[in-house]
Image (cartoon, rainbow, N blue to C red):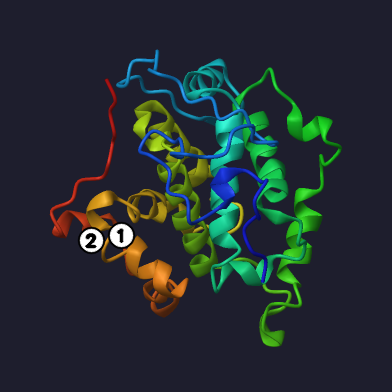
């Protein structure tokens, strides 16, 4: 099993370190060799600004609005930082871990995913293309589907609803931990961004994106994230991947989190 980075890596790869609400880690070592850790003192975008992914005919394109969100959250490295946190968690997850075939640590995995996200958001940045990995996502996913870590009878099967939902929960949780859900325009944009792209892998998954973003809501910490950290198994999804919807949160008296920050 891949473990999070040892001392000297990005502090977000250390799951023992708990980020503050705004995305910094108290007493973190200075001089992270991977990321800038530029957390702005305040956001300039109006928190009620509604910037949506530009999707026409099923095709997504980067926009100036999404680029403005990237700049406002503190730059592209904020995406790399939260993806590092995501992979540190994903490597320990009982389901998602079985898809990994490279053991090069959360920072390296995070760079690959984050570079793709950044390029999809900002038309002025091409880190994914410049990395030489353009066109490599599908071959990489084929290797993941055939990973020797998977049960023999599951090798070759594509991502299904349980896989995509667990992935979304961990991914959104990492964004929340790193303070990005404090930025309301990012939150709204990014949930819709994932809704669009997760459908490539499982057509039923988009309807659960908002619920899975709210799975890590602070009011549900005891029953969700704290309980999960004891086992690294999302048993409710494994038992019935289509069960939990936004109606669950409404019935519990919890509104979907649309965070604001002065």
Q: Between 32 and 106, which is closer to the camera in this rendering? A: 32
**Residue for badge 1:** 245
Q: Residues within 10 Å of mark 1 (few under 14, many from 20)?
A: some
Task: Tell whether 229 sits left or right of 120.
Answer: left
Q: Between 227 and 133, which is closer to the camera in this rendering? A: 227
Q: Position of residue 34 (x, y in %)?
A: 69, 36
Contact (Cβ within 8 Å) of mark 2 with mark 1: yes
Residue at position x 42%, y 51% in the image: 209
Residue at position x 82%, y 44% in the image: 135
Residue at position x 73%, y 59% in the image: 141
**Residue for badge 2:** 248
Per the image, label 2 sits on a secondary structure element best described as helix
Q: Between 132 and 84, which is closer to the camera in this rendering? A: 84
Q: Residue furthest bottom?
A: 153
Q: Quadrant of residue 148?
A: bottom right
Task: Tell whether 241 sits left or right of 11.
Answer: left
Identify whether 61 is placed above or below 214: above
């Amino acid at each position: 099993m891949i473990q999070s980075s040892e001392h000297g890596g990005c502090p977000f790869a250390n799951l023992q370190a708990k980020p503050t609400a705004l995305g910094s880690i108290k007493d973190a070592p200075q001089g992270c060799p991977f990321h800038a850790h530029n957390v702005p003192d305040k956001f300039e975008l109006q928190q009620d600004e509604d910037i949506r992914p530009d999707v026409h005919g099923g095709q997504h394109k980067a926009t100036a609005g999404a680029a403005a969100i990237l700049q406002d959250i503190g730059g592209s490295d904020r995406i790399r930082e939260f993806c590092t946190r995501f992979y540190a968690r994903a490597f320990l997850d009982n389901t998602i871990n079985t898809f990994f075939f490279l053991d090069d640590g959360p920072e390296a995995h995070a760079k690959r995913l984050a570079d793709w996200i950044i390029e999809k958001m900002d038309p002025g940045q091409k880190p994914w293309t410049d990395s030489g990995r353009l066109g490599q996502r599908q071959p990489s996913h084929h290797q993941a589907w055939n990973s020797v870590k998977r049960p023999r009878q599951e090798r070759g099967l594509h991502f299904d609803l349980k896989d995509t939902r667990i992935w979304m929960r961990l991914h959104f949780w990492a964004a929340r931990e790193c303070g990005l859900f404090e930025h309301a325009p990012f939150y709204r944009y990014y949930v819709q961004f994932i809704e669009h792209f997760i459908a490539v892998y499982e057509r039923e998954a988009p309807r659960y994106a908002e619920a899975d973003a709210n799975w890590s809501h602070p009011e549900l910490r005891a029953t969700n994230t704290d309980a999960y950290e004891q086992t690294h198994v999302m048993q409710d999804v494994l038992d019935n991947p289509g069960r939990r919807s936004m109606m669950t949160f409404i019935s519990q008296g919890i509104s979907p989190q649309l965070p604001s920050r002065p």
